[in-house]
């Protein structure tokens, strides 16, 4: 995420490395490189200049404390300004009403339909809502099919009228259906085009006028940079939307949209999305995004993702097994499943300070655990519960069942044993054997 921008900003801060104090000369060189990094990220020139002017003014007027270096001070100033540029703080999301109506708008290919499914899943699992998704794209049958598949996948209801070519009527009928079936949120997926045209704008504006939504979310492909910002402005002029959603943050994202859109349309970014999994939707926190752009990671979000999969009763049960050195292959498999639910593996690792840069050139696929899962799945229940029972003949059978070489199975067994030894050592630590986040 924003890897190129992060590297260029880091390079800019090197102008201050080894400097004992801040002066106008080293500030000028650093600010020039920061501006160049922003322009390379497809940030509008006016925004980049205004941003760096603010950074320069704050840096010139700052005194360097003994506890920090000029470079650290500049990073802090840039972090604060990036946070402010992207909105300052988390924006409220209104999903209240009888029912609450949420209108989704954007160009074709921006990820509208996928986001509609993700938002329904988020409201259902995180907010306890009962959503109804509405297929109001009357031009693309594939959009209706896609939303139907997503709705079935996450277990929510969908409303569609395949033969009706009146999007406004479909939306109004869907609201009636929601009231009749006690659905408290209606999410309307509207039609998009490859480019802005009057027909699309009139249609979505007419739907807005008819249903009076509590939220109008503009979905934008974050890989399109400044073009996304220009499109957002055109939509906002007609719809006066309430918030922005940035999609495809797991792709080759330059950063221009995230850094420019709030400034241009004065509307907050409310959600960010990456990948196709329905769980990969996050509330947008400007401060956390600024930290990630500056290579500081995002431990807060990582912990929240872990807590979302955290089952206290299961965690206590697992802790007891670890204390007794009884952690087995089934426990390991269960933990892998929990990690996979948290989202894209490379993105998760990027949230750990210092790790994002280390893994930037490594291709970490979502099916990275597939081989391990296959090996454990090839074990009998007894073998999973008793790792010491895996004799050479059993290992050979497991290798054959998993489609792996015997060497791969032996290597995994060795790694598993090393992990158990590490857990045993942690259990004997002076902190009383308590693992972070676990209660006694």
Image (cartoon, rainbow, N blue to C red):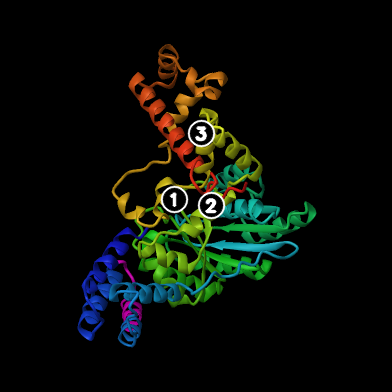
Rendered position, 69 above or below 166:
below
Q: Is residue 20 visible?
A: yes
Q: Which residues are magenta?
A: 41-53
Q: SS class of the residue under badge 2?
A: helix
Real-space CA distance between mark 3 and mark 1, rounded to the nearest whole angstrom? 19 Å
Residue beneath disc 3 = 332
Within 10 Å of disc 1 (Cα), the crowding (few <14, some 14-19, many 20+) is: some
Q: Earlier in the sequence, mark 3 or mark 1?
A: 3
Rendered position, 158 above or below 60:
above
Within 10 Å of disc 3 (Cα), the crowding (few <14, some 14-19, many 20+) is: some
| Dot in front, 3 or 1 | 3
How many marks the image carries: the answer is: 3
Q: SS class of the residue under badge 3?
A: helix
Q: Residue at x 51, y 47 (%)?
A: 342
Real-space CA distance between mark 2 and mark 1, rounded to the nearest whole angstrom? 9 Å
Q: Earlier in the sequence, mark 2 or mark 3?
A: 2
Horizontal relation, residue 34 to residue 244: left or right = left
Magenta highlight on residue 329 = no
Given residues 440 and 276, the one toward you in this image is 440
Q: Residue at x 40, y 50 (%)?
A: 349
Residue beneath disc 1 = 348
Given residues 365 and 316, the one toward you in this image is 316
Real-space CA distance between mark 2 and mark 3, rounded to the nearest whole angstrom? 19 Å
- Labelled pair 2, 1 in contact (Cβ < 8 Å): yes
In this view, which residue lies farthest toward the top?
393
Residue beneath disc 2 = 305
Horizontal relation, residue 258 to residue 360: left or right = right
In the rendered image, residue 377, in percent from the top left (x then y), is placed at: 50, 24
Position of the N terminus by quadrant: bottom left
Res. 145 image quadrant: top right
């Amino acid at each position: 995420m924003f890897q190129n921008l992060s590297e260029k900003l880091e390079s800019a801060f090197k102008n201050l490395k080894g400097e004992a104090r801040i002066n106008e000369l080293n500030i000028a060189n650093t600010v020039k490189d920061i501006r160049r990094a922003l322009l390379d990220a497809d940030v509008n020139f006016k925004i980049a200049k205004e941003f760096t002017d603010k950074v320069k003014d704050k840096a010139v007027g700052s005194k360097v404390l003994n506890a920090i270096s000029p470079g650290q001070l500049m990073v802090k100033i840039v972090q604060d300004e990036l946070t402010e540029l992207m909105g300052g703080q988390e924006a409220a999301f209104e999903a209240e009403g009888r029912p609450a109506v949420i209108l989704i708008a954007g160009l074709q290919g921006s990820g509208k339909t996928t986001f509609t499914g993700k938002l329904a899943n988020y409201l259902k699992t995180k907010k306890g809502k009962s959503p109804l998704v509405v297929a109001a794209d009357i031009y693309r049958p594939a959009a209706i099919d896609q939303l139907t598949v997503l709705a079935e996948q996450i277990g929510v209801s969908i409303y569609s009228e395949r033969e009706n070519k009146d999007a406004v009527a479909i939306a109004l009928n869907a609201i009636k259906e929601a009231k009749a079936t006690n659905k408290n949120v209606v999410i309307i997926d509207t039609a998009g085009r490859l480019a802005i045209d009057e027909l699309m704008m009139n249609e979505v504006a007419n739907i807005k006028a008819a249903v009076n939504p509590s939220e109008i979310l503009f979905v934008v492909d974050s890989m399109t940079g400044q073009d996304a910002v220009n499109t957002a402005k055109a939509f906002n002029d007609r719809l006066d939307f309430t918030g922005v959603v940035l999609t495809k943050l797991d792709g080759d994202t330059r950063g221009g949209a995230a850094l420019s859109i709030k400034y241009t349309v004065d509307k907050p970014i409310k959600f960010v999305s990456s990948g196709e999994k329905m769980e990969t939707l996050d509330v947008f926190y400007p401060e956390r995004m600024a930290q990630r752009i500056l290579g500081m990671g995002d431990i807060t979000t990582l912990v929240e993702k872990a807590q979302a999969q955290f089952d206290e009763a299961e965690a206590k049960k697992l802790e007891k097994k670890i204390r007794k050195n009884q952690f087995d292959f089934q426990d390991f498999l269960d933990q892998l499943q929990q990690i996979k639910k948290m989202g894209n593996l490379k993105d998760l690792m990027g949230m750990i300070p210092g790790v994002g840069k280390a893994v930037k050139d490594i291709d970490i696929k979502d099916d990275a655990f597939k081989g391990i899962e296959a090996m454990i799945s090839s074990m009998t229940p007894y073998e999973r519960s008793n790792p010491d029972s895996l004799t050479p003949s059993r290992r050979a059978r497991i290798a054959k069942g998993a489609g792996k070489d015997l060497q791969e199975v032996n290597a995994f067994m060795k790694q598993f044993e090393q992990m158990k030894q590490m857990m045993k050592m942690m259990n004997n630590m002076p902190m009383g054997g308590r693992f972070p986040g676990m209660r006694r």
